[in-house]
Image (cartoon, grey):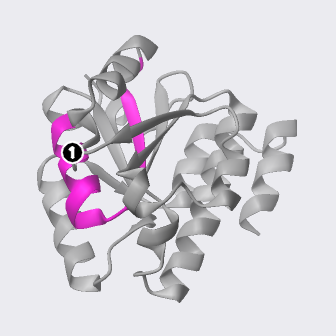
Amino acid sequence: MPIKDSFFLERDKVVLVVIDVQEKLCIAMDEVVLKQLVKNVGILLESAAELNIPVMVTEQYVKGLGATLPELKEKAALASYYEKMTFSCCGSVEFVDAIKSTGRTQVIITGMETHVCVLQTVIELRDAGLDVHVVKDAVMSRSKQNWQTAIQTMTLAGAIPTCTESALFQLLKVAGTEEFKKLSKLVR
């Protein structure tokens, strides 16, 4: 298999996953980093909608942590939502079945916390043979050290570290199209 098959995102092969960006969990996060995460997840959600990419949103223990942030929920209107109690999204049979049912082999991961739910999900998705792209500027933890350690661990597990703009432009492939004109404005 050519190396670019793992490293380049293809819109007909990818699913976007937003992990646990919930109201009460966000309160514990650094405000500056959270603001950037919400912006970047929003960009990816708008891009997924425009490019017809399936979106899956998870919510950890909604009764205790609240729902997904309203500004992201608005941009994820067509997403499938999965409530979970396990840290890994793959602990939800419904989530795993939904990923499998898409027939897609690439997963873009965003959300929180990087060293808990994101990390465990990434390792299980990699174990299932999927190409996983972790958007470093769209995942976060309460501490930068935990975030850094999780990014290193996921990379060692074979996940591809990326950023919002790299993911967007890989999905777009070429400039000059109507999609490019519309979506490139999101990152200016």
Q: Name the image quarter holding the C terminus.
A: bottom right
Q: Position of residue 11 (x, y in %)?
A: 57, 29
Q: Tell me the quadrant of the picture where the N terminus can be found.
A: top left
Mark 1 is on which residue type? Answer: Thr
Residue drawn at 40 percent across, 12 percent down: 101
On the rendered structure, is 107 left or right of 89?
right
Tell me where the magenta segment starts and ends, as one range: 104-124
Q: Decide which of 134, 88 is in the foreground and name it.
A: 88
Q: Left of 31 or right of it: where is 59?
A: left
Report x, y in % for residue 135: 42, 57
The location of residue 152, given as percent across then percent down, is 17, 66
Q: For the residue labelled by badge 1, is the local secondary structure a helix, a strand or a loop?
A: loop
* Percent position of residue 87, x then y: 22, 50
- Whether residue 36 appears in magenta in the rendering, the answer is no
Q: Nearer the viewer, residue 48 or 29?
A: 29
Q: Which residue is mark 1?
A: 86
Quarter of the view holding residue 35: bottom right
Choose between 9 and 134: the one closer to the eye: 134
Residue at the front extreme, as displayed: 63
Can residue 148 be seen here? The reply is: yes
